[in-house]
Image (cartoon, coloured by chain):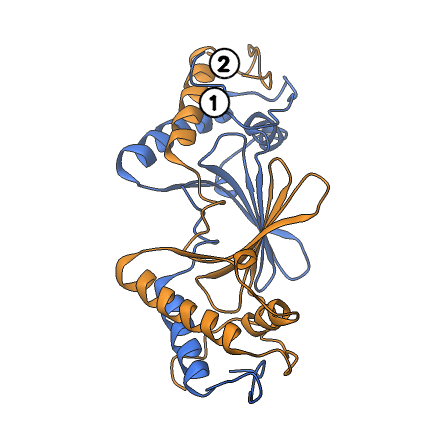
Chain colours: A orange, B blue
């Protein structure tokens, strides 16, 4: 069991009755995806709503994967939640609409989930905005103007 | 102002009195860091507790940078919080001890904050753990054993 000591936190008990070929196939897919992530950096995503899962299988998967240390909320046209599982590199991603109904659910295999990562185009826009702000504000302790106004 | 339309959400009003050379220097450092991030991928971190900030300057900075869409909680030996600022690629990172006292505060410039990103060694351990689990569980719908038990 060497090398397994660092697996984080809560791997919870799960109901026995709902383990199935479906759930085992998903776990095997996650194993392959983790290998690919380590070897090539390739990310992988499983759309849970697209699979013919039996009642209880989703809960079984969630319990089997457990809960890790990182939890992310993204508030953009409805909330999304990203919960790290007990297996690092495997994330449980839930997207809701503005009425908080779950609209989509994914298991994502990545070093950092896509929804969290800042995209280059957005970073470039932020840089432009910050540059405009700084160029317009030759501030001293006594003379400052325009701070906090929308860009 | 083209290219600035995509800057996300709340850039709040900030108190005027505390803008200073310090805060402007930090904003300029962030501008340089965003440029470097885009050009070379190099990340940057500013340790706010190491700087001789005047009272109110931290609040001023926080208000000036605003609040973005992504908020992250990390629960490991005390909580950490990562709040995306309104400038994508700039994150406000706060580390607390187990008594919830703020112990460290950083502004980080990166596509994905380091504390969120799964590290390769940890992912490898998770892969080993998942492989061990799958190897020990030739599960069918009727015959499953050991699900949910700690690895």
Q: Position of residue B124 (x, y in %)?
A: 36, 70
The numbered dot on residue A74 is none
Q: Are marks 2 and 1 on the same chain?
A: no
Question: Where residue A26 sits in the image (x, y, percent)?
Answer: 47, 69
Q: Is residue A50 above or below residue A20?
A: above
Instruction: Estimate the x, y position of residue B144 in percent, counting from the top left.
Output: 55, 87
Identify the residue shown where x is 35% and y is 69%: A32
Q: Give yes or no for contact between labels 2 and 1 (Cβ–Cβ under 8 Å).
A: yes
Q: Chain of mark 2?
A: A
The answer to whether A101 appears left or right of B34 in the picture is right
Instruction: Look at mark 2 in the image and give the residue it sits on.
Output: A139
Q: Secondary structure at mark 2?
A: loop
- Give the residue furthest to the front: A52
The N terminus of chain B - image quarter: top left
The residues tagged by marks 2 and 1 sit, at their Cα atoms, a distance apart of 7 Å
Could you tell me which chain the residue with mark 1 belongs to? B
Q: Residues within 10 Å of mark 1 (few under 14, many from 20)?
A: some
Q: Which residue is mark 1?
A: B24
**In-image side of A147 versus B21 (left or right):** right
Q: Residue at image x 33%, y 61%?
A: A37
Q: Spot the residue most to the right.
A: A99
């Amino acid at each position: 069991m060497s090398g397994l000591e660092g697996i984080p936190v809560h791997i919870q008990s799960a109901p026995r009755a709902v383990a199935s070929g479906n759930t085992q196939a998903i776990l095997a897919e996650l194993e392959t995806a983790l290998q690919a992530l380590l070897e090539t950096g390739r990310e992988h995503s499983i759309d849970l709503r697209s699979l013919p899962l039996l009642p209880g299988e989703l809960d079984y998967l969630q319990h089997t994967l457990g809960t890790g240390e990182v939890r992310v909320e993204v508030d953009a046209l409805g909330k999304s939640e990203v919960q790290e599982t007990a297996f690092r590199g495997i994330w449980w991603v839930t997207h809701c609409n503005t009425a908080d109904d779950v609209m989509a659910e994914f298991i994502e295999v990545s070093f950092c989930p896509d929804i969290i990562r800042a995209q280059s185009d957005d970073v470039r826009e932020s840089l432009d905005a910050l540059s405009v702000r700084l160029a317009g504000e030759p501030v001293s302790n006594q003379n400052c103007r325009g701070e906090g106004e929308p860009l």
